Image (tube, helix red, strand yellow):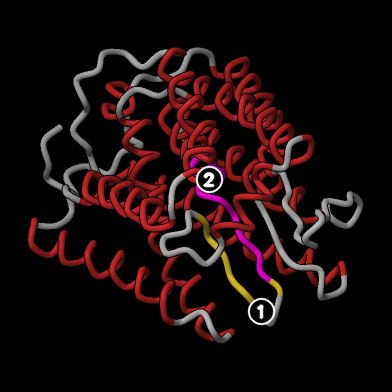
Amino acid sequence: MLTSGILSPVLSRSIFELFVSVIGALATSLGALLYLLRVRLDRPAIGKFNGRDVLILFVFLAILPAVYLVLPRWAVTSLLSLTFMASLSIGFRPLFNPTPLWVGIGVLLGGNIWLGQNALGTVPGWQAFWAETSVVVVLGAVSVANLYVQGGMQLRHVAWFAVGLAVYDAVFTVAIPVSNLLVREFVGYPLFPAVGMRIGFDEAIVGLGDLLVYGLFTAAALKAYGWPAVRLALVLVVVFGAAMPALSSLLIDYIDARADIVIPAQTWFGPAAYIGYRWLRHRYGPERTMREFLASRTVVPDLVAVPA
């Protein structure tokens, strides 16, 4: 999801959106890769990851916006706090002892809530809020992407998940503007789940769901087929996940009644991700399992000594 005001010329607005989306997509994708190479998460005892798990994840993400819209503001902030607390604690527990881990999480989340409640009266305040929010969101996306990929999610699961989100994005952005309503209601809430930045009156954001898909796709590509797949995945993320959605506003009128622009980024990325997966499958054959990935030369050994 990308959004901005319409107070600047179309071209400069699109360049701003492009800059923010490329930075967010690459930060999440490269972060997910670095984490997968160096850190092992305990694998949850949930059996083999399958299509049913993908469907459950999709349904959860699909109904979450409706939950946000019916809850009072304090409840939304509480839910987001718990969500980020869980993702950050799971993802970074292998890297830090409990005391610095929870102090760090408390500082990140508490600082974001303070900024959201006290610093949004000026452009520098908004920029500080978005910078801090972006750090929280990228770290959370990297953690969750690795939780799923190290837990057994395969590239084919991510590809189908992206296709489902492509349809969802098109329906609930273009046909039924739920995404537009979410942006209208929740931008500026503490812990708003997006990477973003503001310049003047213009604002560009990339939603957590989009970033999670990019991190999943890149990490799963590395696990499945190694570095040739990573190169393809990064090209697809940058071109179809960031550049094409941002620049499409030069040709497509996404402007809603409030003069916001909400772009269905997954509608561009989902088909490209699926085609990329099919090409990799055709060229390299079956995907590697997590066990085969760990036994390969791809992994950096023994940099983080945690239980496998």
Tag 2: amino acid: Leu
Work out whether mark 2 precedes mark 1 in sequence or the reverse, and give the earlier one: 2
Q: Is residue 59 above or below residue 264?
A: above
Q: Nearer the viewer, mark 2 or mark 1?
A: 2
Q: Secondary structure at mark 2?
A: helix
Magenta-tinted stretch: 203-214
Q: Position of residue 9 (x, y in %)?
A: 87, 73
Disc 2 marks which residue? 69
Q: Position of residue 285 (x, y in %)?
A: 53, 13
Q: Position of residue 306 (x, y in %)?
A: 12, 42
Q: Nearer the viewer, residue 151 or 219?
A: 151
Q: Nearer the viewer, residue 128 or 178?
A: 178
Disc 1 marks which residue? 199
Q: Residue at x 28, y 49 (%)?
A: 82
Q: Is residue 280 above or below residue 145?
A: above
Between the residue at mark 2 and the residue at mark 1, the CA separation in whole angstroms equals: 27 Å
Does the magenta run of residues contain 206?
yes
Query: Is 115 situated left or right of 46 in this image?
Result: right
